[in-house]
Amino acid sequence: MSQIAIIIPTYNSQAYLISCLESINRQTYQGKINLYLIDDCSTDNTVEIINNFQFRPHIKLSLMINQENMTQGYSRNTILKDIIEPYVVFLDSDDYLDERFLEIMLEKCQSTNSDIVFSDWIFYHDEFQQYDFKKSDSLLHIEKLEGNDCANLLALNIYFSTPAIYKTTFLKDHKILYGEGYWYEDFEFIVNCAMHAQKITFYHYPLYIVRSHDVSTTKQNYDGAKHLYSLEKAVLASLNYLYDRSEYAIYYFYRYIILRTLLYTRTRAPLRFRYQCIKRINQLLNRNQNYSLPDKNSTLLNYIFNQGILKNNQYLKIIYKDWRIRMGKKRRLAFNEIKMKLGSRRVKPHKILFVGFDDEFKGNSKYLFNLMRNKKYDITFLPNYKKNSIAYYAQLNSAKLIIFETWSGFSYQKKDNQVYLQLWHGSPLKKMAFSSLERYVMEKNRFSKARRFNDYQQWDYLLIDNEGDDYYFNDCFIYNNFKILPYGYPRVKWLIHNNNEQVKSLLKKKYHITKPLILYVPTWRDSQLINDDTSFLLNIKTLQAKYPQYQFLSVEHSYLSNITYNHDIQELLLICDLVISDYSSIIFDALKINKKILLYQPDLEEYRSYRGLYEDRFVAFKDIICYNGEEIVDNITNYENIPIIDVDNYIDYDEFEDRFMNLLKEIGLIYE
């Protein structure tokens, strides 16, 4: 018997249906799949496309056709009532799945014994042919909900039921169905799931792609009140199941409905229907006034709930407040537009602008800047200008090529004829961005992934250390548009070129190094966003006292310490005899010049749980991992026995300049 049923309602879906079906055909899951399509009286070629589509042998198609148009809630329910497969997935006919969706979601559901597993989702905009990650709800750092806390599912910013896999018995035992005869049928379904589930698991990777286009249901029929009537029906039906299962369950649903009402009355119906809809929604929500409010909230929601607007039926104040917020947004957009106009509107075809590593003169930025400065290019270093000044934006406006080494964080809109080159700052050992849960990062700032996604969507090129790194960067920077350049890092080129006794002797005098140098370079921990614990750090003073024959030097990550170091880390790498680090990419630089390394990782399992490591890469370092101070002492005592780790995917750094010059030609820059 098939383990998975996929239910797809269709209605005039010919434009997008093939992409949807192909995404099912591409699934890495090799078990049997029963695919149920139910057509809702399409007038185009939808049914013909389904009948002619060639599915793989393990996919069995069942096609049903409604006798009259009944909406997709009815279609889904019709199939759901009769299926016998243990797990079910709902898919909209204009959306599609990542090829790993079924394999990952089924394994997660089975291994965690969850009623539901939700994946993240991402928009694909047909008009711009671009992906857009907007998910920013408070559940982004949550791995699971259990018991009554499952009601906190209602804290989602958008109630999508499709990016998930469900236990069929869970849905049937609790008679969980979609709303019928109106749009927004997901509301009732999600509320019912939140009220009955015992375990909900989240897989924080966008495996479900929501296709945004002009012919979708939510983009049509704006000339009447159909959307608003559907909204009212969806709210009324949902309230029949809602109760205070968790402390804030009712509040979360009310918050969602209020924000949806403000949005839909403004965008999906003529103004004449707006006030009455808000009034009726307000009256529905007032049926239950006994609910708890969280201490922290947005300004708008504090205004609505704490001022008693719902209870006093002062719905016009909601509209007024909504207007003020929109006017504030317009003012911010206007300010951004002014910033664009502050500098020269003309992009200079030969100008190169360096933003720098964390807005400082260091890292790859420093060494590439020095390399190009010697060639007399028209280059500028942005941190030489006061941030957000007129001169600052003038430089951004006039540069043809803008070179970064970390997240830009700009409130600056890239011009069409500008090029972004991202140098990045190291080969990944720890997982980043979408590869990682980033629990503490997302708890601190739930917009973090969305902002970083929008950031790297503007990159044109990403420079990496070697060809073997491309897999890891594609894994964390999903759905990217940039071209990967495995040219090697400028700072590593400098290390290799200067790895000689003459340069080392000069540097030892510069840093007053008179003994064999042990360099300690720990990286920061995500957990420090929440607390100040530094117990994972090695006590260098104790080691210095125990081993006077060595010289110890600690250079902590800027997020770990308020100390300003006047050291160049590449210069210290060149002259050190041993590098002690933890999860930092600096170890890959050290290995390029055959340095001995120890990894001090007393918090390894905890670090794995909230950040994650690329285990296939990490396994190469198993012989140099130290879990406590005693193992560090033992290794230093037996220094000669510390192995040197081999480096794969070596890049010929003698060719770096030629590669980079060819890139400049490709971009179209003028240079001598």
Image: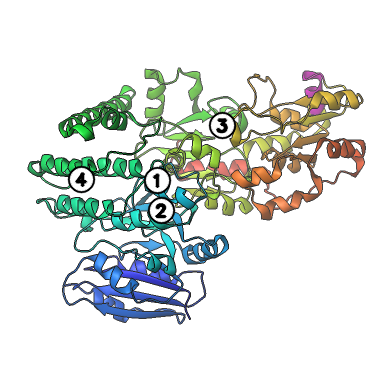
Crowding at mark 3 (Cα within 10 Å: few <14, some 14-19, many 20+): few
Tag 4 near tag 3, CB within 8 Å: no
Q: Which residue is disc 2 drawn over?
A: 121
Main SS type for the magenta part?
Answer: helix
Secondary element type, mark 1? loop
Q: Which residue is disc 4 drawn over?
A: 284
Cα gap from disc 4 to disc 3, whole angstroms? 39 Å
Q: Nearer the viewer, mark 4 or mark 3?
A: 4
Crowding at mark 4 (Cα within 10 Å: few <14, some 14-19, many 20+): some
Q: Which residue is disc 3 drawn over?
A: 530
Can see residue 595? no
Label at residue 135: 1
Q: Residue at x 36, y 52 (%)?
A: 123
Q: Nearer the viewer, mark 2 or mark 4?
A: 4
* Rendering coords of residue 51 (x, y %): 30, 81
Between 384 and 75, the residue placed more toward the observer is: 75
Cα gap from disc 3 to disc 2, whole angstroms? 27 Å
Tag 4 near tag 1, CB within 8 Å: no
Can see residue 272? yes
